[in-house]
């Protein structure tokens, strides 16, 4: 009896230890997001504080500046923020209709086998690493842009251009958008479809008018996710952006510069203002992503309520 | 009729959109195969990236023994036991390369005459480009045979066969352009990141699914982990170099290192591991847990002996997806392992993974599309195989509890 109760006590202690161990791991995992934001904040803000060792940078001219040059230590990211927004939103605009139609095809229209094959294509596209898209972009997309520009009589910088970035990003967010809308479309209540069909609508009418409308909110969530990816995409974009020193860039055939390409290019030394300012750019990137997420989620709530 | 036509047009649009997706995947693969496939060979996988020039003399202890025969590619010198072939380098130059060295050949017992090498023995690796050769003529005098004098591989073999009575020394250049170092770094990164993120990720998933009640704190924890997936990888890189660099400094790193890259990747993998483990835990029937508990097992016993073995598929999926992510990751590593390609990487030295090597050779002054595409093809094949296996596991898994 005594030995037994001792064992129970020991088991209880072991249970407790594991419980706290698992909890600790969960808390640790969750706390990384705070650690990431906190440390990038601390390091990113430091160049704007008085007493910064490499010479204090003016926050206002950093945020609103329209020139970013490493050689003259002129750091302004205002135009880069605008560039990043332009690239990402235009990429979304290009990719959105194609991916919604594709997801409708996979989920509703295609014969079963063709749909499954198409789904595999989307999954493979999703698993292609960013650098590989980068090579494709600098080898193929730039060549396409170059010949398009040549046929219009416009000179480009070897094809690196705003247009190339937009096409690249549209391709890269395509799998995200598509798989999110597939999920949303598949989640639509079958009764809605049946009702529409019973009222005499054709299958296609039902798909386009009823299913897509009902899946609106989920599709929009996919768009938000895709936009986040477009903002944060780094290596592939910097292979074709061209890194313009000033801006913003509105001409499709002109080179551009995004927040991520700014952080990646010309990285040589691991100290000094040119290195630290990259953290400030990273901080701006985080803020842009969070802000756009928040705004779009508000929009999504409005759209969702209308159904 | 018009309704039918309109419907047909709309349906056609969806077919068209899908075709665009197929076209994109197809053209990516086609481009990579056309540019890179011819560069993939054993040499690429097994050799160094940096070309080295070597200067080696035949060892004085070498006594001539007749070499064996050779029937492979190139022109073979029966007397000297070495085969050469004409090659064209990545820069488009015509060169003469060593394709085979017989063990009895004087070229198999060389020592380095480069200052600082202390006469260390060297092997003339296959693929090395010949710059010049000193041989002994009929009078026993040393003759200098320049690259121009060789003309081509066939002529070089003829000269050696007809004029040479002995070999003195050879100047050569190793081919370079290999990815061995990057393969090693990639393996290191996979190992480190999984070693750290697996236990933490599985533990966190167990807590979230087996323990966590629906409290505010727990939903906050879940939200925190979910938010991690949305963080761009370049931001992880920034975090790695500030937060984790001091950790690697404690074990002796004084610059960015492979270890730092691995630690950063461990955090990137966490959400993946957690979510795939948790998905597997959800599928484990509650009756199994109840059965185990009612038989008197403790909660931790139930988790380790009943629940986790059932969830092993999900954990395996997480591991595979993690490997795929590590192989493809580049932006986070630019800041943490540096973009310096290394031939002899260690945990504490800088180096590039395969994906980062692509970035490194593409962002240089003269991008090497052939090499980059070849590496991409290798990466893609691995990633696609992983994708396939994950799907297979998912299918078997879905059946196992039905």
Image (tube, coloured by chain):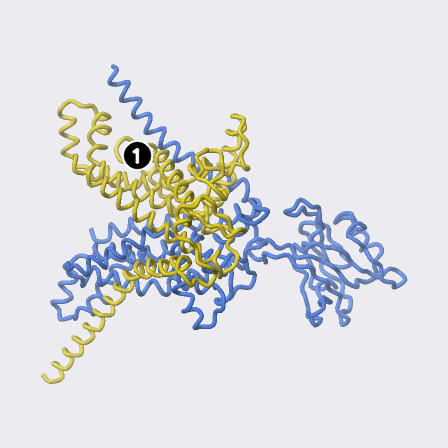
Relative image position of residue B371 (x, y in whole percent): 56, 48
Farthest-out residue, bottom: A2
Quadrant position of the N terminus of chain A in the picture: bottom left
Q: In this view, does A37 lie above or below B151?
A: below
What colour has chain A?
A: yellow
Quadrant position of the C terminus of chain A in the picture: top left
Relative image position of residue B33 (x, y in whole percent): 52, 41
Total marks placed: 1
Label 1 neighbour load within 10 Å: few <14, some 14-19, many 20+: many
Q: Is residue A138 above or below residue B277?
A: above
Would you say B140 lies left or right of A143 here?
A: right
What colour has chain B?
A: blue
Q: In which quarter of the image is residue A218?
A: top left
Q: Nearer the viewer, residue A191 or B60?
A: A191
Q: In which quarter of the image is residue B200?
A: bottom left
Chain letter belonging to callout 1: A
Residue at point 73% right, 53% down? B76
Say whether residue B143 is visible.
yes
Relative image position of residue A186 (x, y in whole percent): 23, 38
Farthest-out residue, left: A1
Farthest-out residue, top: B1
Say whether residue A135 is visible.
no
Residue bearing mark 1: A100
Residue at point 19% right, 30% down? A210
- Badge 1 marks a residue whose secondary structure is helix
Residue at point 51% right, 39% down? A160
């Amino acid at each position: 009896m005594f030995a037994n109760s001792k064992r129970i006590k020991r088991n209880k202690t072991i249970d407790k230890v594991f419980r706290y161990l698992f909890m600790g791991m969960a808390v640790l995992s969750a706390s990384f997001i705070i650690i990431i934001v906190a440390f990038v904040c601390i390091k990113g803000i430091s160049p704007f504080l008085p007493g910064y060792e490499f010479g204090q940078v003016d926050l206002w001219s950093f945020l609103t500046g329209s020139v970013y040059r490493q050689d003259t230590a002129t750091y302004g990211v205002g135009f880069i923020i605008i560039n990043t927004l332009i690239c990402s939103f235009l990429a979304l605009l290009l990719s959105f209709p194609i991916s919604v139609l594709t997801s409708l095809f996979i989920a509703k229209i295609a014969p079963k086998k063709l749909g499954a094959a198409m789904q595999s294509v989307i999954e493979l596209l999703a698993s292609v690493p960013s650098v590989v898209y980068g090579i494709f972009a600098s080898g193929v997309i730039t060549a396409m842009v170059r010949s398009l520009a040549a046929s219009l009589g416009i000179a480009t910088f070897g094809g690196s251009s705003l247009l190339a970035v937009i096409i690249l990003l549209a391709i890269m967010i395509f799998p995200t958008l598509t798989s999110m809308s597939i999920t949303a479309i598949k989640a639509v209540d079958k009764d809605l479809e049946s009702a529409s069909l019973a009222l005499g609508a054709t299958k296609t009418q039902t798909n386009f008018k009823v299913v897509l409308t009902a899946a609106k909110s989920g599709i929009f969530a996919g768009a938000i996710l895709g936009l986040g990816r477009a903002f944060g995409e780094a290596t592939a974009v910097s292979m074709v952006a061209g890194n313009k020193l000033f801006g913003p860039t509105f001409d499709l055939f002109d080179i551009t510069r995004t927040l991520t390409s700014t952080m990646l290019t010309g990285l040589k030394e691991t100290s000094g203002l040119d290195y630290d300012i990259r953290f400030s750019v990273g901080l701006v990137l985080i803020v842009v992503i969070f802000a756009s997420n928040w705004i779009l989620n508000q929009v999504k709530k409005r759209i969702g309520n209308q159904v | 009729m018009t309704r039918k036509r309109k419907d047909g047009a709309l349906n056609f649009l969806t077919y068209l959109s899908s075709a665009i997706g197929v076209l994109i995947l197809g053209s990516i693969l086609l481009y990579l195969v056309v540019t890179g496939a011819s560069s993939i060979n054993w040499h690429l996988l097994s050799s160094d990236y940096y070309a080295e020039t070597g200067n080696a003399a035949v060892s004085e202890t070498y006594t001539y023994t007749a070499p064996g025969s050779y029937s492979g590619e190139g022109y073979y010198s029966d007397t000297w036991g070495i085969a050469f072939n004409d090659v064209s380098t990545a820069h488009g130059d015509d060169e003469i390369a060593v394709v085979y060295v017989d063990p009895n050949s004087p070229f198999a017992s060389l020592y380095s005459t480069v200052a600082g090498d202390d006469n260390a023995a060297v092997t003339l690796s296959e693929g090395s480009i010949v710059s010049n050769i000193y041989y002994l003529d009929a009078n026993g005098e040393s003759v200098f045979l320049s690259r121009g004098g060789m003309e081509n591989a066939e002529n070089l073999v003829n000269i050696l066969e007809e004029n040479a009575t002995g070999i003195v020394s050879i100047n050569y250049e190793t081919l370079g352009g290999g990815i061995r170092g990057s393969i090693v770094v990639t393996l290191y990164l996979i190992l480190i990141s999984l070693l750290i993120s697996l236990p933490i990720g599985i533990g966190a998933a167990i807590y979230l699914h087996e323990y966590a009640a629906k409290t505010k704190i727990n939903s906050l924890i879940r939200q925190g982990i979910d938010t991690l997936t949305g963080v761009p990888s370049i931001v992880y890189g920034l975090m790695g170099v500030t937060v984790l660099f001091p950790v690697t400094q404690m074990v002796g790193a004084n610059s960015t290192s492979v270890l730092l890259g691995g630690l950063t990747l461990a955090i990137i993998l966490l959400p993946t591991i957690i979510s795939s483990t948790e998905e597997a835990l959800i599928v484990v029937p509650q009756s199994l847990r109840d059965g185990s508990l009612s038989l008197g097992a403790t909660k931790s016993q139930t988790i380790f002996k009943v629940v986790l073995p059932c969830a092993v598929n999900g954990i395996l999926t997480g591991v595979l997806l993690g490997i795929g992510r590590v192989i493809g990751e580049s932006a986070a590593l630019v800041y943490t392992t540096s973009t310096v390609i290394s031939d002899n990487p260690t945990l504490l030295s800088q180096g590039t993974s395969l994906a980062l090597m692509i970035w490194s050779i593409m962002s240089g002054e003269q991008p090497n599309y052939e090499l980059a595409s070849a590496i991409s093809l290798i990466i893609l094949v691995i990633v696609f195989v992983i994708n396939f296996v994950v799907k297979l596991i998912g299918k078997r898994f879905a059946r196992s509890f039905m």
